């Protein structure tokens, strides 16, 4: 038997139409819009309702300070350092997704990180649905102490990466993924 797909199926439509957008304009959502979308994203499944995550918005000079932290973490100098320092400047707004797992008698750290990742994915989807350009990025220095310090993370917190957010370039139509990643990744145990 096939379950009926509700007319419109807006969640499925939003998921199927989402694209990562590597190039964005200088426009960005206001903090009030971000808080509203985050309130929705916070409804992901969350064992024991620990909300083991938080999100930090990096705008303006904070992006340059992140670039400086990347360079300090890398030990690079010269042109390689300049290129690395410029990476966070690719979007006007970076949303650092932070996992904040704490010891819990029933909920191990990996479950809490799964919840934080869910918030990241859901927030990315909601921003895309709202018409913003978004791409989740990480890199080799995501969990380096210099980068944690720049975000003023607590001891138990670590980064899951950044949602790079900006305005959409109307000229750009990012391609769909060529393959069907779900093919062969479903099985049934009777
Ligand atoms: C946790 C995480 C980290 C990622 N880091 C990067 C990255 O550093 N660089 C990159 O090109 N893509 C990265 N990606 C993948 C992109 O966000 C994106 O999903 C990919 O380019 C495919 O495009 P699509 O989302 O439109 O299918 C990351 C995805 C996730 C979930």
Image: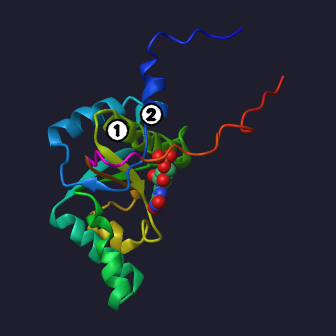
Q: Secondary structure at mark 1?
A: helix
* Disc with the residue nearer the chain's start (2 vs 1): 2
- Residue 123 appears in the rendering: yes
Is residue 172 located in the magenta-colored stretch of the structure? yes
Q: How many marks?
A: 2
In the displayed structure, would residue 45 be above or below residue 137?
above
Residue at 54% in and 42% down: 111
162 left or right of 64 in image = right
Q: Nearer the viewer, mark 2 or mark 1?
A: 2
- Residue 128 is tagged as 1
x%, y% of residue 12?
48, 25
Q: Nearer the viewer, residue 189 or 127?
A: 127
- Residue 17 is tagged as 2
Pick out the residue farthest to the front: 171
In the displayed structure, would residue 33 be above or below residue 109?
above
Is residue 21 located in the magenta-colored stretch of the structure? no
Specify how the rendered protein is coloured.
rainbow
In the displayed structure, would residue 71 be above or below residue 19?
below
Residue range (magenta): 168-173
Residue at 41% in and 32% down: 49
Pick out the residue farthest to the right: 190
Name the quadrant of the N terminus.
top right
Q: Quadrant of residue 73?
A: bottom left
x%, y% of residue 95?
30, 52
165 left or right of 50 in image = left
Whether pointer 2 and pointer 1 mark residues with C-beta atoms closer than 8 Å, the reply is: yes
- Residue 99 appears in the rendering: no
């Amino acid at each position: 038997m096939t379950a009926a797909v509700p007319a419109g199926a807006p969640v499925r439509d939003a998921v199927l139409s989402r694209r990562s957008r590597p190039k964005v304009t200088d426009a960005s959502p206001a903090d009030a819009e971000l808080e509203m979308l985050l309130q929705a994203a916070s409804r992901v499944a969350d064992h024991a309702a620990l909300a083991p995550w938080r999100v930090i918005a990096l705008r303006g000079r904070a992006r340059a300070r992140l670039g400086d932290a990347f360079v300090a973490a890398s030990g690079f100098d010269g042109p390689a350092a300049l290129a690395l320092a410029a990476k966070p400047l690719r979007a006007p707004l970076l949303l650092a997704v932070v996992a904040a797992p704490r010891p819990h008698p029933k909920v191990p750290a990996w479950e809490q990180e799964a919840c934080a990742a869910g918030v990241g994915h859901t927030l990315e989807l909601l921003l895309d649905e709202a018409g913003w350009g978004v791409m989740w990025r990480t890199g080799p220095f995501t969990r380096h102490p210099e980068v944690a310090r720049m975000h003023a993370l607590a001891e138990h917190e670590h980064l899951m990466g950044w949602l790079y957010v900006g305005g959409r370039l109307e000229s750009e139509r990012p391609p769909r993924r060529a393959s069907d990643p779900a093919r062969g990744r479903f099985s049934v145990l009777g």
